[in-house]
Amino acid sequence: MKLGILICDHVQTHLQHEFGDYQNMFINTIIKSNSGIKNLKLSFYDVQKEQYPIDINECDAYMSTGSQYSVYEKQVWIIQLLSFIKTLYLAKKPFVGICFGHQLIAHALGGLVEKSDKGWGLGVTCANVLQKKTWMKPNLISVKLVVSHQDQVIKLPKNCQILIGSEFCPNYMIQIDKHFLGIQGHPEFAREYSKALMLSRKDRIPKCVLDTGIKSLNYVPDGLIIMHWILCFLKKSIN
């Protein structure tokens, strides 16, 4: 399987020495996820620099990273990316959106994304599995992942199923038809990076929210399991 990863942002320069860039995080998590997919090849496209495949069939499936930006911002690269997501959907090309990518799916396909009145989602949070799919193995009744967001999917597109949700984030993981999947959490984020990211934003995060987020890092996230689920979803969607 050839997987194209759409890079929608970069790790802050002063943090890259310790944590690498998002490309490195995805490579490491995918390798460790034990997906069992033979001949998995990764291609990376920096969509902020307008890097895209010449033809969508360059890859069997696509995945997108998170971003500090909002999908409703009128930036040229975001508008182009939304158009590309629509193209993938209409072509029935398998796609998984993570955080910003999850919100891209909703915004591109007629849903609504807004800054949530619930405030920041930070650190390791827990959400409940509401629907179980055959590719969601090993089984979990709830999912713990690192999150970092203010925006949320408020209104769902048509033909959308909610697979995972919580009181704080009801539309945490969604599936549209058989080939589109979005998840608000970050399977690729390590807890150490989550802490560094929170501290780098402490001037705009309320102290009580920041303290709760850092305290939550005592929980062990299910990142490798969720990345395994994602790759199994893509494999099933391709077949």
Image: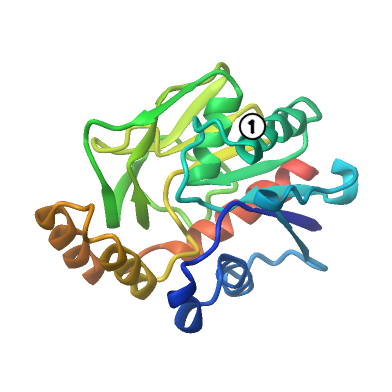
Q: Where's residue 120, x and y in %?
A: 26, 46
Which residue does the image show at 74% across and 47% down from the upper left?
50
Q: Where's residue 211, x and y in %?
A: 13, 62
Residue 84 vs residue 19: left or right? Answer: right
Residue 208 vs residue 92: left or right? Answer: left
Q: Which quadrant of the rendered structure holds the C terminus?
A: top right
- What type is the residue that disc 1 sits on? Ile
Residue 107 vs residue 152: left or right? Answer: right
Against 224, is 169 above or below?
Answer: above
**Residue under numbered circle 1:** 79
Where on the picture, by quarter, is residue 3?
A: bottom right
Which residue does the image show at 77% across and 37% down from the upper left?
93
Q: Where's residue 186, x and y in %?
A: 45, 56
Residue placed most toward the observer, 194 or 216? 194
Where on the picture, by quarter, is residue 23?
A: bottom right
- The colour style of the image is rainbow
Q: Where's residue 189, x and y in %?
A: 44, 65
Against 77, is 155 above or below?
Answer: above
Which residue does the image show at 46% across and 67% down from the upper left?
12
Judge whether residue 143 can be spotted in this image. Answer: no
Q: Which quadrant of the rendered structure holds the N terminus?
A: bottom right
Against 99, is 29 above or below?
Answer: below
Secondary structure, mark 1, is: helix
